């Protein structure tokens, strides 16, 4: 397989992983609280979902996104 330098990395970065983990926790908690009929915590979970998205954007701007200056690129095995 050849290495393509135009490959965006598919979000394999600390910024993407952080955002996805926070949003998965928020979605799981929101589903649980919806099932348990606790509307206040459902809305708190929705807020946490937004915080996850914002954290990904902030970390990307700080250089932890794909191609960021603080990210060490993965080694390519030939």
Image (cartoon, grey):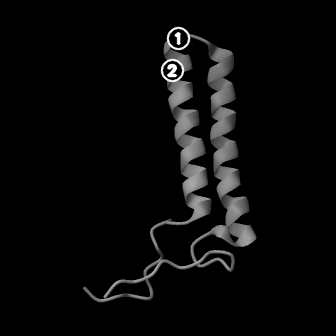
**Residue ID at (55%, 66%):** 13
**Residue ID at (62%, 75%):** 71
Q: Quadrant of residue 4?
A: bottom left
The mark total stands at: 2
Residue 70, compared with residue 47, is above or below; it is below
Classify mark 1: helix, strand or loop: loop
Q: Position of residue 16 (x, y in %)?
A: 56, 59
Q: Quadrant of residue 67?
A: bottom right
Q: Quadrant of the N terminus?
A: bottom left
Q: Are marks 1 and 2 in contact (CB under 8 Å)?
A: yes
Residue 8, compared with residue 29, is above or below; it is below
Relative horizontal placement of residue 36, taking residue 39 as reference (left or right) = left
**Residue ID at (66%, 68%):** 64
Classify mark 2: helix, strand or loop: helix
Q: Which residue is mark 2?
A: 32
Relative horizontal placement of residue 9, taking residue 68 as reference (left or right) = left
Q: Quadrant of the C terminus?
A: bottom left
Q: Quadrant of residue 7?
A: bottom left
**Residue ID at (45%, 86%):** 6
Q: Which residue is mark 1?
A: 36
Q: Position of residue 8 (x, y in %)?
A: 48, 76
Q: Position of residue 19 (x, y in %)?
A: 60, 52
Q: Position of residue 39 (x, y in %)?
A: 63, 15
Residue 39, compared with residue 65, is above or below; it is above
The local crowd at label 1, few if under 14, some if 14 to 19, many if 20 or more residues have their Cα within 10 Å, is few
Residue 63, compared with residue 21, is above or below; it is below
- Please give the label number shown on residue 27: none
The local crowd at label 2, few if under 14, some if 14 to 19, many if 20 or more residues have their Cα within 10 Å, is some
Relative horizontal placement of residue 69, taking residue 14 as reference (left or right) = right
Mark 1–mark 2 Cα distance, whole angstroms, equals: 6 Å
């Amino acid at each position: 397989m050849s290495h393509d330098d135009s490959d965006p990395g598919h979000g394999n970065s600390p910024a993407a992983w952080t955002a996805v983990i926070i949003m998965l926790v928020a979605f799981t908690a929101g589903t649980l609280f919806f099932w348990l009929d606790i509307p206040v915590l459902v809305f708190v979970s929705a807020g946490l979902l937004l915080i996850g998205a914002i954290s990904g954007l902030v970390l990307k701007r700080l250089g932890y996104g794909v191609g960021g200056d603080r990210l060490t690129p993965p080694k390519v095995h030939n």
